[in-house]
Image: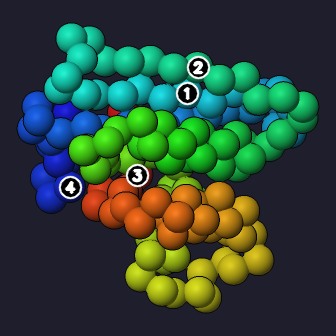
């Protein structure tokens, strides 16, 4: 599967980071994962991260997004697309980027804080594509 912002498909020259996470039970033990499509790699890269301590589903999704942002630091010349199946994460980032601070401001603070410092410090446009996907 390859995605592009306007039609759901990305060409083979694009770096795409798919992030996802889960917790069982909720709250409980969680894990996060990234799948990176990079034209410079022969195969997609799959990364798995256990989450220490007890967390929630949203907490795990926040960690997956944070790990995706952290991975972008390794991409010197690339500006990757980040995709998540978590509508909560995508909406939080979308509303932060467009400047709407009214969408659930009390519960999305963790997501915005996790991303805002990274975006400001690195001065990179990393959110050309950040939306929910269906698999």
| Label 2 sits on residue | 48
Residue 85 in sight here: no
How many other residues sit within 10 Å of disc 3, few (<14), some (14-19) or many (≥20)? Answer: some
Of the two numbered discs 2 and 3 on the same chain, state the one appearing first in sequence. 2
3D distance between C-alphas at marks 4 and 1? 22 Å
Quadrant where the N terminus lies? top left
Of the two numbered discs 1 and 2 on the same chain, state the one appearing first in sequence. 1
| Label 4 sits on residue | 5
| Label 3 sits on residue | 132
- Vertical relation: 49 (above or below) 128: above
State if disc 2 and disc 1 touch (CB < 8 Å): yes
Looking at the image, is mark 3 or mark 4 nearer the viewer?
4
Query: For the residue labelled by badge 2, is the local secondary structure a helix, a strand or a loop?
Result: strand
User: In which image quadrant can residue 129 be found?
Assistant: bottom left
How many other residues sit within 10 Å of disc 4, few (<14), some (14-19) or many (≥20)? Answer: few
Residue 43: horizontal and vertical position, in percent? Answer: 26, 12
Residue at coordinates 60% horizontally, 81% vertically from top-left? 103
- Vertical relation: 121 (above or below) 1: below
Residue 72 in sight here: yes
State if disc 4 and disc 3 touch (CB < 8 Å): no
3D distance between C-alphas at marks 2 and 3? 20 Å
Looking at the image, is mark 1 or mark 3 nearer the viewer?
1
Of the two numbered discs 3 and 4 on the same chain, state the one appearing first in sequence. 4
In this rendering, would 86 be left or right of 42?
right
Q: Nearer the viewer, residue 6 or 69?
A: 69
Query: For the residue labelled by badge 4, is the local secondary structure a helix, a strand or a loop?
Result: loop
| Label 1 sits on residue | 33
Q: Nearer the viewer, residue 86 or 62?
A: 62
Residue at coordinates 65% horizontally, 23% vertically from top-left? 49
- Vertical relation: 2 (above or below) 92: above
Quadrant where the C terminus lies? top left
């Amino acid at each position: 599967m390859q995605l592009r912002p306007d039609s759901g498909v990305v060409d083979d020259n694009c770096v795409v980071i798919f992030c996802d996470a889960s917790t069982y039970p909720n709250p409980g033990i969680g894990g996060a994962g990234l799948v990176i499509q990079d034209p410079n790699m022969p195969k997609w890269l799959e990364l798995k991260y256990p989450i220490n301590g007890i967390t929630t589903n949203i907490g795990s999704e926040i960690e997956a997004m944070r790990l995706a942002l952290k991975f972008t630091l390794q991409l010197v010349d690339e500006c990757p697309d980040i995709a998540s199946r978590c509508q909560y994460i995508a909406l939080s980032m979308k509303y932060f980027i467009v400047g709407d601070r009214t969408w659930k401001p009390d519960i999305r603070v963790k997501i915005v804080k996790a991303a805002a410092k990274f975006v400001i410090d690195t001065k990179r446009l990393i959110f050309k594509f950040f939306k929910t996907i269906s698999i």
